[in-house]
Amino acid sequence: MRLFYLPIEAYPERYTELLRQWTVQRWGSRSDIELHVVNGDLLSSGIGVGQVLDAFGRTYWSTTQIAALVRLLRDVGATSSDVIYFDDLFTPGYEAVPYILDQLPVEARPRIFARNHAQSVDPNDFVFPMRRWMRRYEELVYRTAAGVICASTVHAEMMEAALLDTTAIHVLGLPYDTVDVRARGPQVVAPCSSRPLKVVYSSRLDAEKCPHFFMDVVEAALLRRPGIDFVVCTGAAKLRSNDPTALVRLHSLAAARAIRVAVSQTKPTYYTELATARVQLNTAKQDFISYTAIEASTFGTPTLAPAFRSFPETLRNRSAQLYAPWCVDEAVNKLLSLLDGSAEGTDVEWLARVQHQTLDRILAVFRDEPVPAWASQ
């Protein structure tokens, strides 16, 4: 099978720095796949305009990527057994591909697959306010792709409710490589009970991640258990948020030494923070599985999250790791219990193991092979 892979541009502060590498290593090592990695041109190395991806950079990367794909398809050709895979459903210039394929013989048309990370079906996603036109783009993809891949059943249900089910939707999890991540962290990882009383917050500080609720939990927890080391980690050189009040409050708590802020985190330094913490705290309204939870799982660090959207599926409905959404008292109670070892004896690393298999599940879909639901494994 010939596979044309269009990765997302890499940002050091985001998971995209490793996503391309994990995918190319896994698929490129297969002797039965002729892998063509189609890159675009980078406009910048960081996120300047936008929350998740740089608005200018995403557009420039995608349009130059599509141009490279068009040239490649013309030069090497393709068959109906080949696949074009978009790592991000929103790839400006996408419409050029079905435009070309519809003018080729059926036997020369590769199938298109794309990953939907969130998009306008999620009211907490940054493109939701763009839905007046973004939904039309999404309909274009769903009417021209052979399949759309997503991480969680909750997300799939959102797409179906939005009537974006004109193509097959595959719930396969998030691409991940446990071996690679472990190699970037500390060689020796102590059991949670031997670690300092440290809680890591790894999410962005944007409103959909509920940073104010996180800080409410910090303040309430420190009243009951002084001495907890709350650390906010980011790969960016400075903190940013679409909610300026969150930054003001965070800087105030940092000045009072209630929170420690770790900026410019490389993957090794971040993984060291994670591997030496007892808990990772997630307070987001929007996370379909969450890479931060998978990374925490890799190092045996339990994630505490709201029992909301895909978190119950992600954390196997473990009561110790789920709190009633936006209930500070319960979040603090569960947090203190986890610090005292309430997750000991549970298979915290299950999430990382099962997401390590996602790239293999995606290949199985490309080959029309049966794929078990990741959450049942």
Image: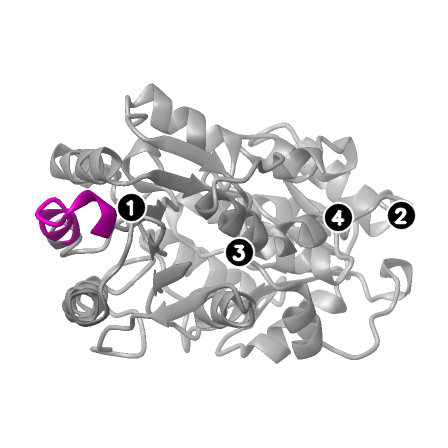
Q: Is residue 321 magenta?
A: no
Q: How far across and down, in percent of the image, does residue 106 sit?
A: 20, 43
Q: Sequence order check: which comes first, mark 3 or mark 2?
A: 3
Looking at the rendering, which quadrant does residue 369 occupy? top right
Camera-side mark, 3 or 2: 3
Q: Amino acid at mark 3?
A: Pro
Question: Circle 2 — which element?
Answer: loop
* Residue at image location 74% in from the left, 44% down from the top: 335
- As measured in the structure, the alpha-carbon distance from the residue carrying label 3 to the one carrying label 2 is 27 Å
The quadrant in which the N terminus is found is bottom left
User: Under tag 3, what secondary structure?
Assistant: loop
Label 4 to label 3, Cα distance in Å?
Answer: 15 Å
- Which label sits on residue 213? none
User: Would residue 247 appear left or right of 55 to someone viewing this image?
Assistant: right
Instruction: Decide which of 54, 220 is in the foreground and name it.
Output: 54
The residues bearing labels 1 and 2 have C-alpha atoms spaced at a distance of 37 Å
User: The magenta stretch spans which residues?
Assistant: 97-108
Query: Residue 36: percent from the left, percent from the top?
Result: 35, 70
Q: Which is more foreground, mark 4 or mark 2?
A: 4
- Verify CB contact (< 8 Å) between mark 3 and mark 2: no
Residue that badge 1 annotates:
126
Which mark is on residue 175?
3
Q: Give coordinates of residue 291: x percent, y percent.
A: 55, 55
Q: Which mark is residue 344?
A: 2
Look at mark 4 in the image and give the residue it sits on. Answer: 350
Nearer the observer: mark 3 or 1; the answer is 3
Residue 117 seen: yes
Q: CA distance from mark 4 to mark 2?
A: 13 Å
Looking at the rendered image, the disc whose residue lies closer to the viewer, 4 or 3, is 3
Residue 8 on image: x %, y % = 34, 64
| Amino acid at circle 4 | Trp
Q: Are marks 4 and 3 in contact (CB under 8 Å)?
A: no
